[in-house]
Image (cartoon, rainbow, N blue to C red):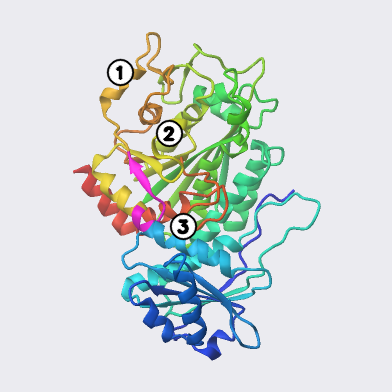
Amino acid sequence: MNLLPPEARVEIVARDGAATAASLARADATIIVLEREGADAALRGLPHAPIWSALRRTSRKSDPHAAVVTRLPNARHTLAVVGFAKAGATGFERLELARKLVHEALKPGVTRLQLHVHGFKGDERTHVLEALLSAALAAAAPMPHRKSKPALRSDLARIDIASKPNVAFTQSAAIAEGNHLARWLAVLPPNELDCVGYRRTLQQLARREGWSFRFYDEVALKRLGAGAFLAVSRANPHRGAGIVRLTYRPKRRARQRIALVGKGICFDTGGINLKPHRSMYQMHGDMQGSSVAVGTLLSLSKMSAPYTIDCWLALTENQIGPDAYRPQEVVTAMNGVTIQVVHSDAEGRMVLADTLALASREKPEFILDFATLTGACVAALTERYSGAFTNRDGLHGWLQSTGRAAGERVWCFPLDEDFDAELESPIADVMQCTLDNKGDHILAARFLSRFVAPSIPWVHVDLSASEHKGGLAHIPTEFTGFGVRYACHLLGDAGALHERLTKAAT
């Protein structure tokens, strides 16, 4: 069974030009965004101005910022949506508005969509158009469908952007493809995307994209001393768990090497410490750290990133059974650190421990890991932000400002050494976690820090925003693929990345 999503088929054309009655008549649907300040005057300058002014007068009575929607009096009966954005909006606000406007415009039968912006200048104009493009691509991307009746799929084939060509639009298309992959994999049912099927899917993707592929199976991991990972995989009814390494190399030889790491628990029962039904229901999505990591790799390779990227994915289930690992066991990780097991449902940090240690051996310039790791991070931030942790305090401002600009927001938590006191073990080097949930997102990050070489700048993202009912920002689905867009904004400029890391080290 082919578990990869269909490749993108939407043509994107950027060509400068104002909206005219004739140009609008060439589209099945159009979205026009006006700056709120002076919006009424701008409406009077649009084609079919009397229609817009009348609709605006009616809508303002209930909501002064509500979009206005109508069919234009042309042969195509173009579906037109006019929205209103405030100047200086945040990246998240632009994306949220874009999702709502695209929802109104992207109806069945819409094959050609036009995007227009009036009243904004310079970079802000590009940012608004980019948000609309990203939202349209996200909405048009199909999700896995297993109903007996055929799925209703988007008919969108072309997006015309009223702007000069811009690199931001090309990058948006690449990011949308990676985000689609991340969401698609997360939605697949666990009887299809078990860790064995996942490995085969990644191998197929690697062949398609020209990446190298290596799989460290349980035999190889035992030889490497990966006792933390193998404790979790022990209860599986198969011996197909392991760590996948995907490597992208740019066309020109690169001096820089970065590592992406992802937690890929394809289903999490909680193990011996069995989850209750409500907590277990969506646990096929506990592999989203890995899907975000590989989605990021796909986007960066489509963007022709100028450095070598290793993507390390920890693939297993956390099953219940007579061989499941238990509280009070002591296991030894790949770097020699001994771990006292406290709770079998803290399996994510166990598999990441060995995966981070393996990634560190390559001495990358930077490690970025993703994991749906703790409920404590959701409790701290809700599902609208994700948590960020780093072993370089000097990166905090960059990590948060990048999230604000990208529209995938993160909040940096402390990672001071004195938190280690909570994880002191009487019989091993470190306790896996504590018996309560107090600050577990911070303690989990402190635990993981033991498996990253101190010389390597490292960022851990706890994906509390990986699921949000009704969608989040420009994404219309519950599984958001949060992290792909964020990571691409962090890593898209190799020179800026190197400069940031150098400053953080001094």
Residue picked out by circle 2: 379
CB of mark 1 within 8 Å of CB of mark 2?
A: no
Report the residue that reaches farthest toward the front. 61
- Quarter where residue 441 is shown: top left
Q: Nearer the viewer, residue 308 or 114?
A: 114
- Quarter where residue 265 is shown: top right
In terms of sequence position, does the residue under pointer 2 or pointer 3 come before the other?
Answer: 3
Q: Residue at x 51, y 61 (%)?
A: 99
Q: Is residue 44 visible?
A: yes
Asked whether residue 407 is drawn in magenta, I would say: yes
In terms of sequence position, does the residue under pointer 1 or pointer 3 come before the other?
Answer: 3
Q: Secondary structure at mark 1?
A: helix
| Image location of residue 362, percent across then percent down | 41, 40
Residue picked out by circle 3: 300
CB of mark 1 within 8 Å of CB of mark 3?
A: no
At label 2, the amino acid type is Ala
Report the residue that reaches farthest toward the top. 426
Residue picked out by circle 1: 421
In terms of sequence position, does the residue under pointer 1 or pointer 2 come before the other?
Answer: 2
| Image location of residue 65, percent across then percent down | 42, 66
